[in-house]
Image: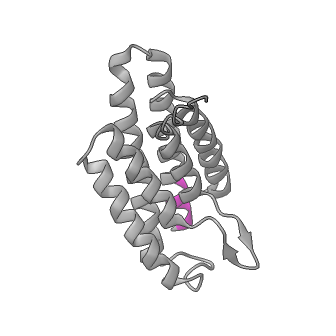
Amino acid sequence: MVLKEPAPPAAPARPGLKIAIGLLVAFAALRVGGLDLLFDPIGWWLCLLGVGDLKPGSKAGWLALGMAVLSVVALFEGDAAQGTSYSAFWLGYAAGALVTLWAVVDVAIRYIRPSGDHYDVTLLDALRWAVVGAGAVALLAESGYAWLGEVAVIAMYCALALLVVILWRLRA
């Protein structure tokens, strides 16, 4: 008779992976028939879980929780406000998303900095600046205070894609 050992428990998902998937779900839109299949509250919840693994009780976790709640409210706001100009709610929501992204990536940077991986720390910091800077210009353009809004949006999403890839491959 051969005794088999029980299977080892599954390793928990890496916090960097949770944050990467969370940011991807929160910022990307996959629309089918006007319905966004990427549910933003789940993305912010994943960011909250990833931040909770790295630094429990941090401000970034509270910001992610707040954005999860706001994104549920945004579901009921609907697309009525999206037209030629955003309403104050959508501008606040977008600004909150950028602030939360900054704080969440900051927690990841502070977590990996002691390991001596200066390349990833510098890259994450530069990409964080690029996403938030281009996103701020896009918000100003949407409000009528700047030009080249489409260019800023494209730059923001390109930097966000790189940021997600870097967070995805982190061993954090």
Residue sticking out furthest to the left? 57
- Locate residue 96 relative to residue 16 in the image: left or right: left
Q: Which quadrant, please, contains the C terminus?
A: top left
Q: Nearer the viewer, residue 85 or 31?
A: 31
Q: Residue at x 50, y 17 (%)?
A: 119
The answer to whether 69 is drawn above or below residue 49 in the figure is: below
The answer to whether 118 is drawn above or below residue 37 in the figure is: above
Q: How is the image coloured?
A: one colour
- Locate residue 26 relative to residue 116 in the image: left or right: right
Q: Position of residue 78 (x, y in %)?
A: 56, 83
Q: Quadrant of residue 68?
A: bottom left
Q: Residue at x 33, y 46 (%)?
A: 52
Q: Position of residue 87 (x, y in %)?
A: 48, 78
Q: Residue at x 26, y 44 (%)?
A: 56
Q: Position of residue 110 (x, y in %)?
A: 33, 29
Identify the magenta region: 137-142
Residue sticking out furthest to the right? 33
Q: Quadrant of residue 69?
A: bottom left
- Locate residue 97 relative to residue 28 in the image: left or right: left
Q: Residue at x 57, y 32 (%)?
A: 4
- Prevalent SS, magenta region: helix
Q: Nearer the viewer, residue 165 or 158?
A: 165
Q: Which quadrant, please, contains the N terminus?
A: top right
The answer to whether 49 is drawn above or below residue 141 in the figure is: above
